[in-house]
Image (cartoon, rainbow, N blue to C red):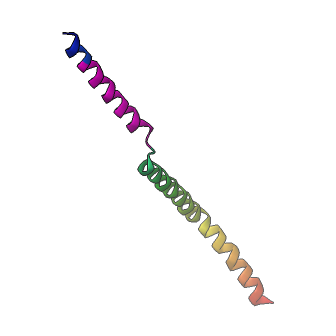
Amino acid sequence: MSTSLLRVWVNAQSRLELLGERLTRPQRGAAMVEYGLIVALISLVAMVGVKFLGTTIGSVFQSIAGRIAGV
């Protein structure tokens, strides 16, 4: 009975060691997903900014062009 209990203990211990190695291994794929999400968020903010400021900036450039043409 003690040898079978020892086998179970050694088996459980080796499985826990493998699990610990998996958890401490670098997660390269997760970092790439995070970078992708950051790029997507920056792009979204830039598009919203251009959408709201585009007409204002366009009118400023039209005003400048009108003044240059009038000179």
Give how far across and how far down residue 22 sits, in percent. 38, 38
In the rendered image, the quadrant that contains the N terminus is top left
Q: Quadrant of residue 67?
A: bottom right
Is 21 contained in the magenta span? yes
Left or right, residue 63 beside residue 20: right
The residue depicted at 43 percent of the width and 42 percent of the height is: 25
At horizontal 24% and vertical 19% (from top left) the residue drawn is: 8
Q: Nearer the viewer, residue 65 or 23?
A: 23
Q: Residue 62 falls in which quadrant of the image?
A: bottom right
Q: Is residue 18 left or right of residue 67?
A: left
Give the image location of residue 6, x and y in percent: 26, 16
Name the foreground residue: 7 vs 12.
7
Q: Is residue 50 above or below residue 23?
A: below
**Does 21 appear above or below 68?**
above
Residue extent of the magenta highlight: 7-25
Q: What secondary structure is the magenta-colored segment mainly? A: helix
Picture coordinates of residue 43, whole percent (x, y): 52, 61
- Direction from residue 53 to residue 22 in the image, left or right: left
Is residue 36 a member of the stretch shown in magenta?
no
Q: Residue at x 64, y 74 (%)?
A: 58
| Image position, residue 26 (x, y; %) | 45, 45
Q: Residue at x 41, y 51 (%)?
A: 29
Q: Is residue 56 left or right of residue 19?
A: right
